[in-house]
Amino acid sequence: MVDQMLIRLGRWLRLVGNDVANPGGADDPELMVWAKQENRILLTRDRHLYESCKTAGVECILIKCTSLIGQLKEMAMEGVNMVLNPQRCTICNGALREVAKTVANGAGCQPSTWKCEGCGKLYWTGSHWRRIEDTLNKVRSEKG
Ligand SMILES: [Zn+2]
């Protein structure tokens, strides 16, 4: 689960196959209760919230970087596998269902396509995929 400041990081964590809950309008105490109920790890850049989690026994990771790449590296160091793995909708966290596989046909190459079972958004392996891979490569290569 991400807090309000880390929604963008949450979207990236979904791209690499994680179930990430958005905070919605929940305040800090509500986030802590929610994380505990659903056994989620809370990600925050707020040291005060982090300390509260420690006291309350809620699993929490304090993110230090402000840049997305830096934040992804921190998550890589926490053991998150930085490999593109579409399982969850980046918008609503709904489960993705594969509706088409990459096939080469006479007309060229049809990309793999996934559909979100929550909001219906379609995902496919288009040109933006390359940019996502590039970013993840950067995270992996600069790690450690
Ligand atoms: Zn969705």
Image (cartoon, rainbow, N blue to C red):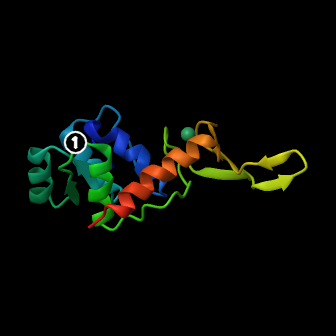
Residue at the outermost top position: 25
Q: Which residue is mark 1?
A: 66
* Residue occupying image coordinates x 26% and y 43%: 67
The x, y position of residue 128, in whole percent, is 57, 41
- 54 or 34: nearer the eye? 54
* Residue occupying image coordinates x 28% and y 65%: 77
* Residue occupying image coordinates x 33% and y 62%: 76
Where ligand 1 lies, by quadrant? top right
Callout 1: 10 Å neighbours few (<14), some, many (20+)?
A: few
Q: Is residue 6 above or below residue 54?
A: above
* Residue occupying image coordinates x 72% and y 48%: 111
Under mark 1, the amino acid is Thr
The x, y position of residue 5, in whole percent, is 26, 37
Label 1 element class: loop
| Left or right of 83, for residue 63 | left
- 132 or 44: nearer the eye? 132
| Left or right of 144, for residue 120 | right
The x, y position of residue 131, in whole percent, is 51, 45
The x, y position of residue 7, in whole percent, is 35, 39
Q: Indicate the quadrant containing the C terminus: top left, top right, bottom left or bottom right.
A: bottom left
